[in-house]
Amino acid sequence: MPPRLFMRTRVPRFIGAASVLLIVGCASASQAGSPGPSAAVAPSAPASAAARATLTPSSPPSVAPSPTASSLPAVGAAPSGPWSRLDWIDAGAIVPLGPTNVSVRGWSGGYVALDQTGGSDENGNSIPVVIRSSASSDGIHWSAPSTVDTAGIVGEIEITQIAAAPSGLLAVGYPVGDTCGGPASVAALWTSSNGTVWRRVSLPKDFRTGQVHTIDGGPAGFIATGSKADGTTQALWTSPDGRTWTSRPLPKVSSGTLVLDGATSFGGGFVLVGAVLGEGGCGGPARVHAATWSSADGAAWTRSTLPGSMTAADASLGVRAISDRVAVVTQSSPDGSKVLAWTSTDGRAWTPVHAPSDQLTTDPVTDGRHAALMMDPDSGSGAPTVFAIGEDAGVTILGQSGNGPIASEDSGGWTFAVGPTGILVVRYDGGAAWLGLPS
């Protein structure tokens, strides 16, 4: 039986419910212009996929009284470059939220925790949506909970993503549950300088009449993909701050049909990934010719090729920033039996990844410098396995020590994030938290 993934909170259509957390060792400075403190990053060699650290199971949970912020050790900035192991701290019920649907996100300046309830009751009746937030710069000391503006929102929505750019943070709210007729569209947006107080965004007309399926943030700003009011014409928008959005032209193709599968923002600019569909023949399907397009500002796009990419009737494509300076594109066959991957530092020249792991096809959780993957043991009980992904897209296992999270049948679900001090894991009810200090 394959290993079970640690569960995250409910997520939009483009992230599976059994999602994963990715760790990237970055060899550059933290996100340029990002608000809030972050550690300086010294140059270092990327992690190798062949390297493997020894996994040491965490010790059983302590029965001592739950710690408080004042009783926990002081933590500093996580080291730059690749990590080899984690030393876990049992932080107890340190996050002042709960008792249900708690989630946590990380960025270069800290961590943001949310708890979210309401939308409808057990009988399907509409009730107010209530979202509270708390922020921390180190994962130990948290701000008092504040209420996020949800006035006028009808139905169930949740903030399932927090994106970061030099201007600050953007929280993205999606409908929960039924997505009949197509993927979910963004229902609400909020901005914040540090995650403590959030300001509601007045959605532009294009967002209200059309659909916005994905939003990504990074050093180049924010980029959104979706469709116009007719529901079929693809659309792109960019924003420097998450509040003012500009419609951008689609890439031009000389022949065939353009299909966009995703977009990302990183130090090299904006990158789109998709395909040009060739004409079908003799009743057969069109062929998919994978491609990427790059732009500094979204105003004009330059096409690039992916060396050795699959040309097939059906293939899944994805793009994501694995750090502020490296993006990765993945392509997989319909049955997942074949995975290809490429990395780039500028969005124009792409280097094939040798024997890429199928774990690269998952959506990373990153603070712009590192990202990580955590999985339950095969037995369902014991310490999780933590994987690291280097800037060369190689996958390694991190060693572990200390009093970390232990999976069991009754331990409940977990939410987790990568931030400036390490990996923060929080139980869904907010009743327990662990901070993994990397080295």
Image (tube, rainbow, N blue to C red):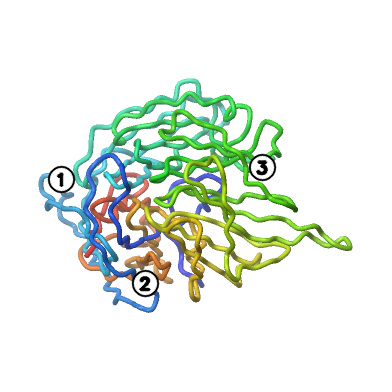
Q: Which residue is labeled 3 in the image?
A: 182
Instruction: Report how far apart the C-alphas of labels 3 and 2 lie in the structure.
Output: 36 Å
- On screen, residue 225 versus residue 21, left or right, reads right
Percent position of residue 424, x then y: 29, 52
Q: In the image, what residue type sits under mark 2?
A: Thr
Percent position of residue 146, x then y: 30, 29
- On screen, residue 233 versus residue 149, left or right, reads right
Which circle, 2 or 1, is nearer the viewer? 2
Which circle's residue, 2 or 1, is located before the other in the chain? Answer: 1
* Residue count near mark 1 (Cα–Cα under 10 Å), binned few <14, some 14–19, many ≥20: few
Residue at 33% x, 47% y: name it: 106
Q: Quadrant of residue 162?
A: top left
Which circle's residue, 3 or 2, is located before the other in the chain? Answer: 3
Residue 161 got which mark?
none
Residue at 18% x, 49% y: name it: 66
Percent position of residue 185, x then y: 58, 37
Which circle's residue, 1 or 3, is located before the other in the chain? Answer: 1
Task: Please determine whether, in this image, residue 266 is positioned above or below residue 187.
Answer: below
Which circle, 3 or 2, is nearer the viewer? 2
Q: Quadrant of residue 132?
A: top left
Q: Which residue is labeled 2 in the image?
A: 396
Q: Check whether the beta carbons of the residues at disc 2 and disc 1 lie within 8 A of each other.
A: no
Q: Check whether the beta carbons of the residues at disc 3 and disc 2 lie within 8 A of each other.
A: no
Q: SS for tag 2?
A: strand
Residue at 34% x, 36% y: name it: 168
Q: Which residue is labeled 1 in the image?
A: 68
